[in-house]
Amino acid sequence: MRVAVFGTGGVGGYFGARLAAAGVDVVFIARGEHLAAIRTRGLRLESGLGDVLVHPAHASDSPTTVGPVDVVLLGVKTWQVSEAADAMRPLLGPETCVVSLHNGVETPAVLTHYLGAAHVVGGVCAAFSFIAGPGHIRHMGGTPFLKFGELDHHKTARVEQLQEAFERAGVVVEVPADIHVVLWEKFMLVVPLGGLGAVTRAPLGVLMTVPETRQLVAWGLEEMAQVARARVIPLSDDIVARTLAVLDTFPPNGTSSLQRDIAAGKRSELEAWTGAVVRLGAEAGVATPLHTFLYASLLPMELRARGEVAFPG
């Protein structure tokens, strides 16, 4: 099996390094100093679950020089998906599947629009990891997991082979019966914490233990559950309670990528996270007052990061 990691950030770098350490042929698509470091010193993964050094590592900034692969793990930011879909065409053979590692529910539709449904496999993951420096991925804690499946719910050989590869790599992996339900379940794990964390600047443990902010997290989860059900996603009746229980097991010092990006003045996934809840809720006729407030509160900083608004002084 040949795998391309398109976007070797904290998440793509983590899972790609695990696969490479297990003997899978992995090529890392990266840019700039990160690419140069991977080429010269290899890709280093620092993790309490075991460090990895992929050296020598196959890395490139040009999919054209890589050629067709069996699997593309897509790790770019959500606003880069359209551009990435066009750029990855040289990686696609007749049976190539593209698995998104995003925290969002709209990416499969975007990929299907550009690449065709036959190439798209729905995917979700969790990994508190980030680029600590050029060629260096740091995993902050917790047990990363990966779930993926065909959009039409069928079991296929390519999905089974990818599952086996991740199992050999020691990654917690699952092929669920309905990937669309799982996409929404994972979406609920990150979106309220992302928006609330960015507004309060508090880590996950504080948000979950201060009664007032914990109540806001629960409120945000309930809004999302109502939107999902209005869109005919069969979430369980206890989804809010189960999600809160899962969040209680996460590293207390954890922060979302959205929170970190906004704090650093970078462009974030606000549109694909909080903005998507507001937008999809409006389409389904479901009110989302908390997410509407969070989106409006964070939008000025997002627009500044895009260069569309300037703050005086």
Image (spheres, grey):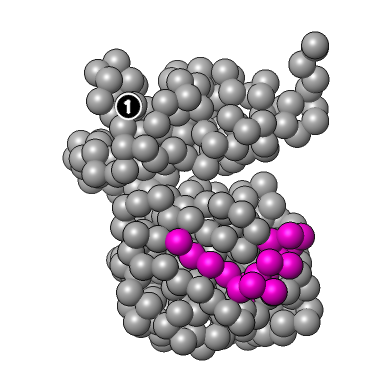
How many numbered discs sit on the rendered protein? 1
Q: Quadrant of the C terminus?
A: top right
Identify which residue is drawn at 67% across, 37% down.
267
User: Would you call the spot at circle 1 few (<14 residues within 10 Å), some (14-19), or many (20 or more)?
Assistant: some
Name the amino acid type tagged 1. Val
Give the residue number, with chain letter if any, for mark 1: 206
Residue 124 sits in quarter: bottom left
Q: Is 73 rendered above or below residue 90?
A: above
Q: Nearer the viewer, residue 207 or 67?
A: 207
Identify which residue is drawn at 53% across, 59% down.
137
Percent of width and height locating residue 253 = 37, 37
Q: Nearer the viewer, residue 208 or 99?
A: 208
Q: Is 293 rendered above or below residue 35?
A: above
Q: Nearer the viewer, residue 215 or 263?
A: 263
Identify which residue is drawn at 45% across, 72% down.
52
Q: Nearer the viewer, residue 206 or 136?
A: 136
Identify which residue is drawn at 59% across, 37% down.
261
Percent of width and height locating residue 255 = 44, 38
Q: Is residue 245 left or right of residue 170?
A: left
In this rendering, does residue 191 appear at all? no
Percent of width and height locating residue 33 = 74, 60
Q: Is 227 rendered above or below residue 107?
A: above
Percent of width and height locating residue 11 = 50, 58
In this rendering, does residue 50 appear at all? yes
Check if residue 179 falls in the magenta segment.
no
Q: Which residues are magenta?
A: 27-46
Q: Is residue 291 left or right of residue 118?
A: left
